[in-house]
Image (tube, rainbow, N blue to C red):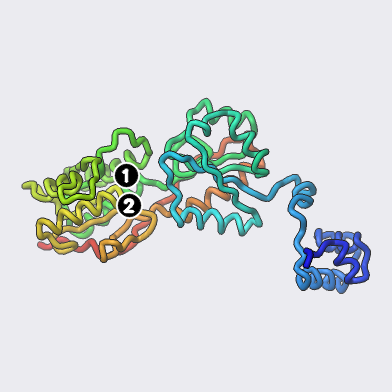
Amino acid sequence: MAHPTIATLAEHLGLSRATVTHVLNGRGDTQRISPKTQQRVREAAQELGYRANASARAVRAGRFGSIALIQSLWGQYLPPELLFGLTRALADQDLHLVLSQVPDPMMEDETYLPHTLHELSVDGVLLNRHVASSPGYLETILRLRIPAIWLNVKQEFDAIHPDDSQGGRLATEFLLTLGHEKIAYVDSDEPLNAHYSKHDRKQGYEQAMAAAGRVPHVYALPKLWHHEPGDERIAGAKALLQSPERPTAIIAYELAEAMAVVHASHQLGLTIPGDLSILLFHSRTDDRYFLPFHTISNEMEQVGRGAVLLLLEKMQSPEVPLPTRAVAMRLREGMTCQKKHP
């Protein structure tokens, strides 16, 4: 069966096309169409499955009703929580999401975004890449009046990201309240990883340790990961746990570092959380260790929702830079931390 149109609705109801059009476009009252007739039109439209033509609606409104998520092929990070936040916030605004993946250098080409707006028929763009854009590129986007918001990067304006420094402080303060004094921060040695969270999480940890009068201990595991018994990350974690100043609690940059510590603990006969408490950063509570990890959540759903609201504001005045927003992280309880034994 063909999709019903204004013409078929008008014929079905015995009304003029103009009357049906006015009602469906919300102009029934201004055109002095009776409430009873308006109700008949709406009920018939629902019964027959009428949907407005997207192209025609776009022409009338001056909008396409779609937003593009431009995803970099390098350093991809699109957790389900972020995608859920984006799609729910867009659905609340009756907007659709278009996903596109491109090589990272292409995103710095000043011709790319104007072309994308036209080619994908979208009203604005959300850019999800691993590093912030250059100041010159951001100025170009403003000059061209392109509505764009960056996700999960730290730059002066037009971006939204988790507050990783606050998250580092939150993690450390939580372990301090459990009585731990020897708290180590464990990351991987990745000199080419320029994401701001590598610096900010560690900075928050160091700030909280200093405020408590404790000495910070930052430990970098080797990057190599061979999935063999002699894995260098696990060996690095074992060296940390066998040191004279063995920590009683560890904050891991993310899951990879936490699992290296878990493997090392088991090989050394240490129990979690009995002998060692572990807390990590993640977008959700992870239980692949069989126990759910205590987690500092980066609140990606809220980042997604906030990004849509920022972009809607940006679409009103594309040439005006909006202050970057940092979303507070929060602690999700698990089963890998406990109070330090006396």
Q: Quadrant of the N terminus?
A: bottom right
Please tell me in which quadrant of the rendered image residue 14 appears: bottom right
Q: Residue furthest top?
A: 136
Up the image or down, 250 lies above or below 146; here it is below
Q: Residue furthest left?
A: 244
| Position in image of residue 123 (x %, y %) | 66, 44
Up the image or down, 69 lies above or below 87; here it is above
Q: Quadrant of the C terminus?
A: bottom left
214 or 92, which lies in front?
92
Tell whether 317 sits left or right of 47.
left
Disc 2: which residue: 281
**Element class at badge 1:** helix
**Element class at badge 2:** strand
Identify the residue at image location x=39%, y=52%.
298
Up the image or down, 190 lies above or below 18; here it is above
Q: Amino acid at mark 2?
A: Phe
Q: Amino acid at mark 1?
A: Arg
Lower position in the chain sequence, tag 2 or tag 1? 1
Disc 1: which residue: 201
Please tell me in which quadrant of the rendered image residue 48 appears: bottom right
